[in-house]
């Protein structure tokens, strides 16, 4: 069973930075993309950023230029560097891994990010 464990969330002031990490393990397939999603209170879950096995990245317009997704292949760890944080970035952030073969997506348990104004 795929395991995704997020860490690095917390409380930060507007304009501050946080770095989220996601340790992946027990991955029984080799071709996959990884990503970050978030869900704010009373809002739908939304894509934040994704990264393919080849390193191609995709970002939501709302975070472009402020967030950077990256992965350490040796450590099987996904990162999200978040700079210039805004109160509207407050949400639970989820790490995902998607098997390219059939688009099956696995989710982590989420980590809370709170940005105060």
Image (cartoon, helix red, strand yellow):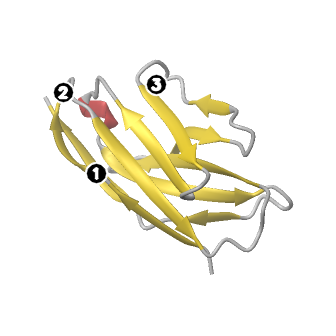
In the depicted structure, whether residue 8 falls above or below residue 108: above
**Direction from residue 117 to residue 80 in the image, left or right:** right
Residue identified by numbered label 2: 14
**Direction from residue 57 to residue 20 in the image, left or right:** left
Q: Disc 1 to disc 2, how far (Cα)? A: 14 Å
| The disc label shown at residue 62, or none | 3
Residue identified by numbered label 1: 9
Mark 1: give few (<14), some (14-19) or many (20+) Cα within 10 Å: some
Residue at x 61% of width, y 74% of height: 2
Note whether residue 45 is visible: no
Query: Dividing the picture into quarters, in which one does residue 18 lie?
Result: top left
Note whether residue 102 is visible: yes
Mark 2: give few (<14), some (14-19) or many (20+) Cα within 10 Å: some
Front residue (pair 19, 108): 19
Between discs 2 and 3, the one toward the N terminus: 2
Split into 4 quadrants, where in the image is the N terminus? Answer: bottom right
Instruction: Give the residue at the far right of this rendering.
Output: 101
Instruction: Give the residue at the far top of this rendering.
Output: 65
Q: Disc 3 to disc 1, how far (Cα)? A: 19 Å
Mark 3: give few (<14), some (14-19) or many (20+) Cα within 10 Å: few
Q: Tag 2, which secondary structure?
A: loop
Q: Tag 1, which secondary structure?
A: loop
Residue at x 70% of width, y 33% of height: 56
Q: Position of residue 89 (x, y in %)?
A: 33, 35
Q: Disc 2 to disc 3, how far (Cα)? A: 15 Å
Split into 4 quadrants, where in the image is the C terminus? Answer: top left
Q: Position of residue 96 (x, y in %)?
A: 57, 57
């Amino acid at each position: 069973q795929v395991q995704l464990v997020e860490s690095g969330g917390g409380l930060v002031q507007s304009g501050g930075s946080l770095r989220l990490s996601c340790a992946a393990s027990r991955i029984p397939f080799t071709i996959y993309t990884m990503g970050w999603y978030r869900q704010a209170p009373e809002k739908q879950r939304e894509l934040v950023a994704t990264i393919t096995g080849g390193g191609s990245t995709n970002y939501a317009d709302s975070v472009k230029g402020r967030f950077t997704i990256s992965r350490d292949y040796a450590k099987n760890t996904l990162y999200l560097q978040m700079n210039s944080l805004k109160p509207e970035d407050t949400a639970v952030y989820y790490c995902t891994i998607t098997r390219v073969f059939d688009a099956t997506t696995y989710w982590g348990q989420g980590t809370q990010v709170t940005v105060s104004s």
